[in-house]
Amino acid sequence: MKQEENTIELIKSSGKRVRFSIEKLKASLKHSGADTATIDKITNTVRDELYQGISTKEIYNRAFAMLKNEKLEYASKYKLKKAIYELGPTGFPFEKFIAALYQYSGYQVTVGEILKGKCVNHEVDVIAHKKNHHILAECKFHNEEGRNCDVKIPLYIHSRFQDIFDLKNEKKAVSREGWVVTNTRFTEDAEQYGRCAGLKLLSWNVPTGDGLKERIDRLGLYPITVSTLLSKREKQFLLSRDVVLCRQLLSDKFYLDHLGVSENRKKRIFSEISILCNNS
């Protein structure tokens, strides 16, 4: 006899076991923009294929394949979290991506600048400022899903930011914030330290309601890696040319000529990312 779905345990990429939730699956599918009929079709299929110890990756792959058959833009948005991991293997494209989030939020931004501290100099991943509001952001990128940022990371970064802030003595009132940004999750201790120390944290779902997921959707700043039509080689070529955003490729279409992409494929690629950006 088939087990009830609420008794099925899934294995996450971290190795942790969690109970299957049909509501969480529906919520992720709804976030992709899929209509009710598509959501019901996929959840019913996944429910029928559940077994004890199934991996969350297997469920994701099944849902992604079905979304891709329905509409490419559904699949593109559904894979957003995975697409951020694909900004690797180095962390620099992720830094550029985070810089773009601040830039399109009205900040003037620089990347990889050296700042003098009270004790030593520090290279800061992203510096953003708007009027009297200054932000220093350090980006922690991980290629592997399941790896979390523990408390040692905000502890270390906070001490660096304090060394920089201790040197500053602006005559005007200036609001200064230090941020730690990651494509993974923060541990509970890391979040607790951030709250206590006044260090801001940004990850997929932190802060609540204003994490990476919400900011990307709100600004329509999807990474080029969300495309379901570009190959891995093509994505790496674009990232190596600092083309990190879908909207950048829409502005600089000549990059696909360098890659030798056929006219028919170009039309499909531009259609996919145009719909995604314009629907945001």
Image (spheres, helix red, strand yellow):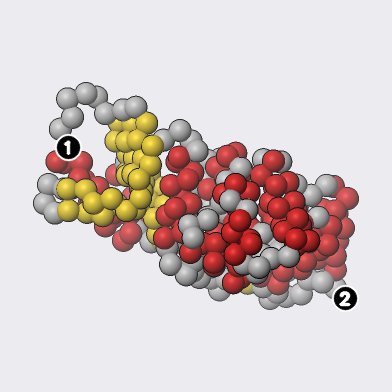
Element on which disc 2 rests: loop
Residue 92 lies in what quarter of the image? bottom left
Q: Label 2 belongs to which residue?
A: 1
Mark 2 vs mark 1: which is more N-terminal? 2
Residue 250 percent across, percent down from the top left: 63, 49
Q: Residue at x 70, y 62 (%)?
A: 228
Give, as a three-letter code, the residue at label 1.
Lys
Q: Would residue 7 appear left or right of 43 to someone viewing this image?
A: left
Q: Residue at x 62, y 53 (%)?
A: 253
Q: Would residue 196 appear left or right of 96 to someone viewing this image?
A: left
Compared to 89, does 273 lie above or below?
Answer: above
Residue 3 percent across, percent down from the top left: 81, 71
Q: Which of label 2 and label 1 is nearer to you?
A: 1
Q: Residue at x 88, y 50 (%)?
A: 37
- Near mark 1 (Cα within 10 A), the count class, few <14, some 14-19 or many ≥20, is few
* Nearer to us in this view, 121 or 240: 240
* Nearer to us in this view, 84 or 204: 84
Q: Residue at x 45, y 33 (%)?
A: 106
Q: How many marks?
A: 2
Determine if residue 69 is in view: yes
Per the rendering, the mark at residue 264 is none
* Nearer to us in this view, 46 or 160: 160
Give, as a three-letter code, the residue at label 2.
Met
Q: Image quadrant for the C terminus?
A: top right
Element on which disc 1 rests: loop
* Nearer to us in this view, 144 or 125: 125
- Near mark 2 (Cα within 10 A), the count class, few <14, some 14-19 or many ≥20, is few
Q: Are marks 2 and 1 in contact (CB under 8 Å)?
A: no
Per the rendering, the mark at residue 168 is 1
